[in-house]
Image (cartoon, grey):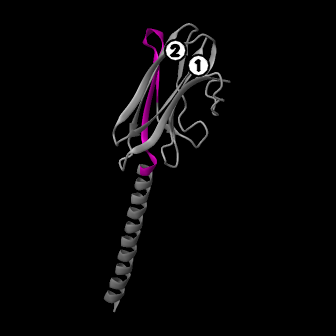
Amino acid sequence: MRLSEQDSSSSKFGRRHVRRGYLIRALLVHLLASSARAEHFDITLVATGPNGTSQQAFADQTPPIGGLNSRPVLRVRTGDIIAFQFVMTNVYAHGYARDAGVRFYMVREDGLGQKIVPPLENVTVEGSFHFNLKPKARIGAKERVVMSKPGAYLLRVESLHTQRDHEHFAAIDLEVR
């Protein structure tokens, strides 16, 4: 009689353990699948000042306002030439990015690290284009600008119309003295 009670309790424990294992595996698969769905663009943004000083930023997303990562700061002087380039890669493994777009701009902000994107009035540099991008394909641009006025500026590249639940961006702050 004791042997059958032990067998019964150990088999209940075994079933609970197996069920818990299945639950944990199912939760992990769900989390991995949802994180894989969330990422559709990888962005690398590089800004270079005189003498080769540079900063780079990578893909981020909102929420929270301003993104998850703090922005790097490139310090330059008025009259300096700033070169920047970005590369955007479609990392969404399940299809084309159809009728998507990218917008890049440099706009004055109230202070370095400002969380809210300033109004796009009186931008220093601005550009955008639309595209169809197959998986693993890349698109990008290079620009140069002379900074004529001191202040804090936001350099930002952002995806547009990707038909997903959020857009990606990369951003660098410029401190012009």
SS at circle 2: strand
Do labels 2 and 1 touch, CB within 8 Å?
yes
**Residue 16 screen position, x and y as percent:** 40, 74
Residue kind at label 2, given as amino acid type: Val
- Asked whether the viewer can see residue 155, the reply is no
Q: Residue at x 58, y 8 (%)?
A: 78
Mark number, residue 56: none
Q: Residue at x 38, y 42 (%)?
A: 91
Earlier-in-chain disc, 2 versus 1: 1
Residue kind at label 1, given as amino acid type: Thr
On the rendered image, what quadrant is the C terminus found in? top right
**Residue 26 screen position, x and y as percent:** 40, 64
Locate residue 111 relative to residue 22 in the image: left or right: right
**Which quarter of the picture shows residue 133?**
top left
- Asked whether the viewer can see residue 87, the reply is yes
Image label count: 2
Q: What whole-number distance in Å separates the C-alpha atoms at marks 2 and 1? A: 8 Å
On the rendered image, what quadrant is the N terminus found in? bottom left
Magenta stretch bounds? 37-57
Q: Which residue is mark 1?
A: 124
Q: Residue reaching furthest right?
A: 110
**Residue 163 screen position, x and y as percent:** 49, 47
Locate residue 120 relative to residue 22 in the image: left or right: right
Q: Residue at x 56, y 41 (%)?
A: 62
**Which quarter of the picture shows residue 109?**
top right
Mark number, residue 145: 2
Which is more toward the observer, 166 or 19? 166
SS at circle 1: loop
Q: Is residue 7 above or below residue 126?
A: below
Badge 2 crowding class, 10 Å Cα cut-off, few under 14, some 14 to 19, many 20 or more, is: some
